[in-house]
Image (tube, grey):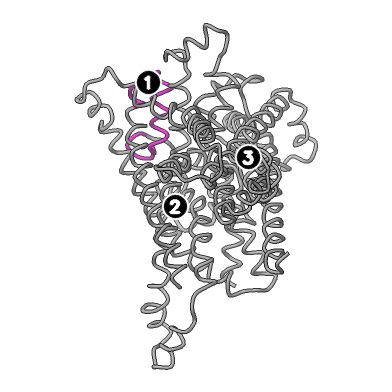
Amino acid sequence: MIPGRGIALAITMLVIAIFVIVPLSSIVLSMAGITPERFVSVAFSPRALAAYRLSLGTSLAASAFDVVAGVWLAAVIVGERSLAGRLLNACVDVPFAVPTAVTGITLVTLYGPNGWIGSLLARAGIGIVYTPLGITLALAFVGLPFVVRTVQPVIATLPREFAQAASSLGASRATILRRVTLPLLAPAMLTGFALALARTLGEYGSVIFIAGNVPFKTEIVPLIIVTRLEEFDYVGAAAVATVSLVASFVLLLAINALQRRLIRLRVAE
Amino acid sequence: MAAFLVLGVLVVLPLASIVYESLRLGLGPALATFADPYARDAIVLTLLVALAAIVVNGTFGVLAGWTLTKYRFPGKAVLLTLIDLPLTVSPVVAGLAVLVCFGNRSPLGAWLEAHGVQVAFAPLGIVLATIFVTFPYVARETIALLNETGRELEEAALGLGAGVWQSFVRVTLPNARGALLNGLLLCNARALGEFGAVSVISGRIRGLTDTVPLHIEDLYNEDNLVGAFTLAALLAAVAITLTLIRSALEHRGRTRRAIGA
């Protein structure tokens, strides 16, 4: 028994309360005088509903893309032990490291009609900037490291026996991938997907520059909160923020459960 | 080969385009960005805010690492979840939380203002919002590491006659050093670049509550692209350097563990 439990626990809880719990609960408390009907009409106004749909749709699409691209990238990094592999490994951290506002102005410049990539796409008739596709692009960029870093250690320690056994029994490479490798990777893929989703749902800085920010069309949830605040509509901002907060909390619990399972699975191996 | 295409689109082109836009009119105009007193004020404020976040989160990280791994108590999972909560909360919601809690509309904010402490639309609010978004970074690292090392060493120190404080300083802290440093680097990188949370609470008073990321947005919206991308290049260079240091440390740690030293 190490003494000092009471005081250590008290200070820890106090710090968490001051910096996290009190600020977050004050969002909910700030709507104390509002009737449930008013809350529903503000939090689920047509404009807010359009933003939830857009945010959820673009985040889901971006995270799904990240799972596919991330698994492939992780496999390349694990398999490639040369300098190129190490270089690729270091580069995966860049979208995570670079500040969101920097990502925002860079992507809109790069993919804008006069940008290096945007001008090529414009010639093919594809417009990205100020469309939901642009939002998805920015979200996929910031979400990618979360998938790669979750899947990579699992791929690195993947037991080879199953694949070898399947191969000796005459399974094709596609069958091995589908029936052996992917099922082994599924828990890590799901965890990476949830992490990317959590990050992208609340993402602001990298999106607002490329989004266009037109209500009902390209207005994401965090932006609607900022817009309400600029109109001094604190209740409107708090109502939408409460919905967003509930989503973050549910996602956090799901991620914790998934990660616990992932650790158990790896220990079991 | 396809991997290099991804590398180019993901990293090389964005970074090259930041440098290109910054130097578009030559080195002179790019460097002139730093002659602007508002840009200098923003750099100083950003450094101070990051320093505050490092001090608070570093202290809390060590404390949480100790409390959550050296003692048994009910509700530990709940406490861990609360520490992780800022990871999934939108930065904008984080900024709003600080604004609603400490703004002059709340009783707490009104009381503080009556005593001369301004939080909303002031540097202190920026500090609180930054601490919120970086809150889990150090604690997660220290908790994970101290959980692995267990309690035996501290119990041995106590058995040999050391006090709690002594075993914390002489046994736990040296053990947690690597995790602490790793967490602080992560926290620092995020604090220097935080945008969403800070933009809600800042009020954008130039020379007073404008951080570098916010100033980048100001310059961009004013069509001062050279200025915006020069500051962006500065932030990106710092962020990438911090990441490289972190992966170098991680690599060294792994080799040391592998050879059993």
What secondary structure characterizes most of the magenta part? helix
Residue type, mark 1 in image: Tyr
| Image quadrant where one finds the C terminus of chain B | bottom right
Of the numbered discs in the image, which one, if any, rests on residue A195? 2
Whether discs 3 and 1 lie on one chain: the answer is no
| Image quadrant where one finds the N terminus of chain B | bottom right
* Chain letter of the residue beneath label 1 in the structure image: A
Residue B178 shown left or right of residue B142 in the figure: right
Residue type, mark 3 in image: Val
Of the numbered discs in the image, which one, if any, rests on residue B30? none
Earlier along the polypeptide chain: callout 1 or callout 2? 2
Please determine whether, in this image, residue B104 is positioned above or below residue A184: above
- Nearer-the-camera pick, B5 or A201: A201
Residue sticking out furthest to the left: A37
Residue sticking out furthest to the right: B28
Residue beneath the point at 54% across and 20% down: B203
Residue type, mark 2 in image: Leu
Q: Residues within 10 Å of mark 1 (few under 14, many from 20)?
A: many
Badge 3 is on which residue?
B164
Provide the residue span drawn in magenta: A215-238
Badge 1 is on which residue?
A234
Percent from the top left, x then y, of residue B79? 44, 40
Please determine whether, in this image, residue A84 is positioned above or below residue B95: below
